[in-house]
């Protein structure tokens, strides 16, 4: 049994339309979802913990009567870590340590310089005080995601990391709790959905108000994050995960088939695309896909994903393959080619670039070090992997000497009067020396 | 005639409520505005230039029949610059050069490191390809704002900077066009409102699609920016401008009164707050306010702003004053004190910090160098001045050696199986050496 996957060439007449059809994606947050979310946010803002308990009982099939039942303590987190099988605990700690080491390189420092007249200019960099980390419940509860979201905040110097994770029916995911312990999470509340986002954004008697909310979630969570943006900071709102593999035709086709599967298995909307300049190689990978698919635990999801959103694309040459990659601006770009470093200068847009045949994207998902929270759906055109910089903020510094203020005052005065802002002008003019 | 300004002390019983009342601000984007904006965006997406011309004729009282009439050329910008009175042109160019010099320090470079087993990890930094700059028309059309938004993009290496500015009734602001020339803007369309935002976000036959939209605007513009967030990047949605002056009581009270006026004159919603540990000094500044206000061109706006949103606050001591500053997380913080450097380490949240008696905030608005686009309404808790970093993006780099992939594969395999993602596990396992 073979699987249907879209296949086309950059040389065919309708290539642009084919690409548009392939890449079109719009997250649907309809009016009903927006209304529900707005109502939930209003309730949390006005009734706080009481509303949070009600929504949690209703949506997560819980029966609690106090917020104390919706908070885990540090001991529970540590016990989850201690209770893991040794190989899992070891793997989690290795991953946490590598992620921490990479993110240490992202820390930015304050800087300043002094001009000839003694005026000092600079930028002071400080961590946020407190951030919220949303962790989805159920099947999408990934411990790796806890590491990837919490460790950059920790490295940035954030003092309080507040995690929320829904526990539908009361079921706790021990690996997620263990990851929270490994990553240095401060407090954990077992709440989720728009109500958890609202509680973090506005605070309740029990849940502290945070400065920024990060982490993936369903359409209610994404809609709530968009709604509270401005009250708090948020990270990018993620679409389905995607990979673009560019291969010169010399990597084992089984490897590439499995790399494509590793995206496709996330969910039916995930997208796996292979570009090659070698038509025979596309055939070979297709044969590997047909051969390996029946052996996969999540073959139904993979089949739907590949059929609905996958593609095998024939490129004319290396430059053409690079143009396709830049057009897609993929979340994950695997350059499974000889000498990937020679490709790098021409790659303009990608969340993460996996270079060479050995660098499976899955290594980056877990433990290579870089973050696995990456811009999706072409947003790599303007956004970046989650990083330490997302948890630091900057303040401009200006300290004028008397001479500096006098000189700058003259320029400011002219410009302010050009804008008819005379208080600005006069404020500057007070500092001009006679 | 004296003016009413709220006055209170941090020692009074209702201090927390006073502060909450003082700082409460919520931009209202009601359902009607949202519906209007959603309809405009839909029209621009489906009918492109035709809709853009219709909306522009309707909202900006224009009578054009083609997009060619809604674009300015580089010669028009240069002529605007050349045609300025010499002192204004000189001031604009001095300001542009200082802003450019400061922002050069913000440029971030790519980095990488190689581990013992040959695995390379890093981060590639690239500019965005194309950004949109919204400039308000009418009374809020500030040339300084063009410099502050366009220059960081230019310094980042953005190749195309597309400016939109409405020209109600067809009236062009020559200083704004001159600033566009000085700042290196690539193209200018005389369109505005939600329709301009939609055109930049989705592109039309004439207006190129951009990767990010920055710049201030009215409630329709802000609502449109929020709606297209995700399709493109956006900057923070700004609230009214604010200043917090902290003074030790030894700066000329006229200077401080004028510094407060310079915020208040922006608009009725602007906020000016003075904190001092010296009650007599608060009286002195109040007297200066009463004395100077009748001499101000924009005294009506200033009076409303100070009465509705201003405050004179008595702090107990230096630590208390700092706590108030951190509570407010002001857009502009003026430390009009002796030895402001000793205050700096304890200031956690502020958009820009103006240090010392000579550093009037107005100097920073125009020409000191740092950006005047700053986080408002307490968002300095989690966001930063507009900067070069807002126009750069990062891609993670991972290039595993054969040995590195083998070792990392073992860890990834264990974690992937813990998440029941077996394609991830098998993809990693292919790279483990036998």
Image (spheres, coloured by chain):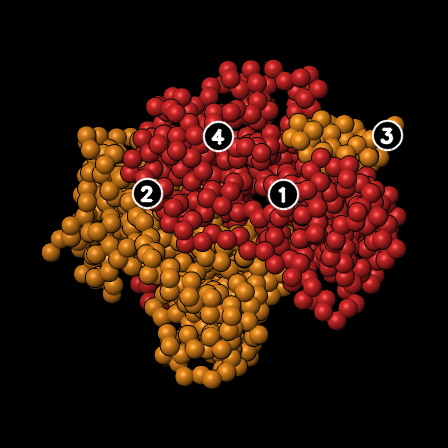
Chain colours: A orange, B red
Alpha-carbon neighbours of circle 2 within 10 Å: few (<14), some, or many (≥20)? some
Chain name for mark 3: A
Marks 2 and 1 share the same chain: yes
Q: Residues within 10 Å of mark 4 (few under 14, many from 20)?
A: some
Disc 2 or disc 1, which is closer to the eye? Answer: 1
Task: Kindly identify which numbered label has been placed on residue B267.
Answer: 1
Q: Chain of mark 2?
A: B
Residue sitting at x 57%, y 18%: B80
CA gap between label 3 and label 2 equals 56 Å
How far apart, in angstroms, are the residues tagged by discs 2 and 1? 32 Å
Which x, y percent locates residue B49?
33, 30
Q: Which residue is mark 3?
A: A433
Looking at marks 4 and 1 on the same chain, the residue that comes earlier in the sequence is marked by 4
Crowding near the residue tagged with mark 3, few <14, some 14–19, many ≥20 C-alpha atoms within 10 Å: few
Tell me how far mark 4 sits from mark 1, CA to CA: 20 Å
Mark 1 vs mark 3: in front: 1
Sequence-first tag of 4 and 2: 2
Task: Tell me where residue A422 appears, x and y as whole percent.
Answer: 72, 33
- Residue at 54% x, 65% y is A202
Task: Say whether marks 3 and 2 touch (CB < 8 Å).
Answer: no
């Amino acid at each position: 049994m073979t699987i249907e996957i879209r296949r086309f060439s950059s040389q065919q007449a309708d290539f642009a339309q084919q690409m548009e059809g392939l890449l079109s994606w719009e997250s649907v947050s309809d009016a009903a979802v927006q209304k529900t979310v707005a109502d939930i946010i209003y309730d949390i803002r006005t009734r706080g913990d009481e509303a949070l308990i009600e929504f949690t009982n209703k949506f997560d099939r819980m029966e609690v009567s106090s917020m104390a039942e919706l908070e885990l303590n540090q001991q529970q987190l540590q016990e989850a870590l201690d209770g893991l099988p040794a190989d899992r605990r070891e793997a989690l700690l290795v991953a946490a340590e590598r992620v921490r080491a990479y993110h240490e390189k992202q820390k930015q420092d304050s800087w300043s310089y002094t001009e000839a007249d003694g005026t000092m200019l600079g930028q002071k960099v400080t961590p946020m005080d407190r951030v919220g980390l949303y962790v989805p419940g159920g099947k999408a509860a990934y411990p790796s995601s806890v590491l990837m979201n919490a460790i950059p905040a920790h490295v940035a110097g954030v003092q309080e990391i507040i995690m929320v994770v829904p526990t539908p029916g009361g079921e706790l995911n021990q690996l997620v709790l263990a990851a929270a312990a490994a990553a240095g999470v401060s407090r954990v509340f077992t709440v989720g959905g728009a109500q958890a986002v609202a509680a973090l954004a506005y605070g309740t008697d029990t849940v502290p108000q945070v400065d920024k909310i990060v982490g993936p979630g369903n359409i209610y969570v994404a809609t709530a994050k968009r709604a509270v943006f401005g009250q708090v900071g948020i990270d990018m709102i993620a679409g389905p995960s995607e990979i673009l593999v560019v291969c010169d035709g010399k990597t084992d086709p089984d490897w590439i088939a499995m790399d494509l599967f590793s995206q496709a298995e996330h969910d039916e909307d995930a997208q796996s695309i292979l570009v090659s300049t070698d038509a025979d190689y596309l055939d070979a990978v297709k044969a590997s896909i047909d051969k390996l698919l029946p052996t996969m635990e999540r073959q139904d999801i993979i089949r739907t994903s590949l059929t609905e959103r996958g593609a095998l694309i024939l490129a004319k040459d290396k430059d053409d393959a690079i143009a396709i990659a830049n057009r897609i601006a993929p979340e994950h770009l695997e350059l499974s080619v000889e000498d990937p470093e020679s490709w790098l200068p021409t790659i303009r847009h990608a969340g993460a670039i996996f270079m060479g045949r050995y660098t499976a994207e899955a290594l980056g998902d877990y433990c290579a070090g870089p973050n696995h929270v990456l811009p999706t759906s072409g947003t790599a055109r303007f956004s970046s992997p989650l990083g330490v910089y997302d948890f630091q903020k900057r303040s401009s510094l200006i300290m004028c000497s008397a001479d500096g203020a006098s000189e700058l005052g003259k320029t400011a005065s002219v410009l302010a009067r050009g804008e008819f802002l005379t208080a600005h002008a006069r404020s500057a003019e007070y500092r001009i020396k006679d």
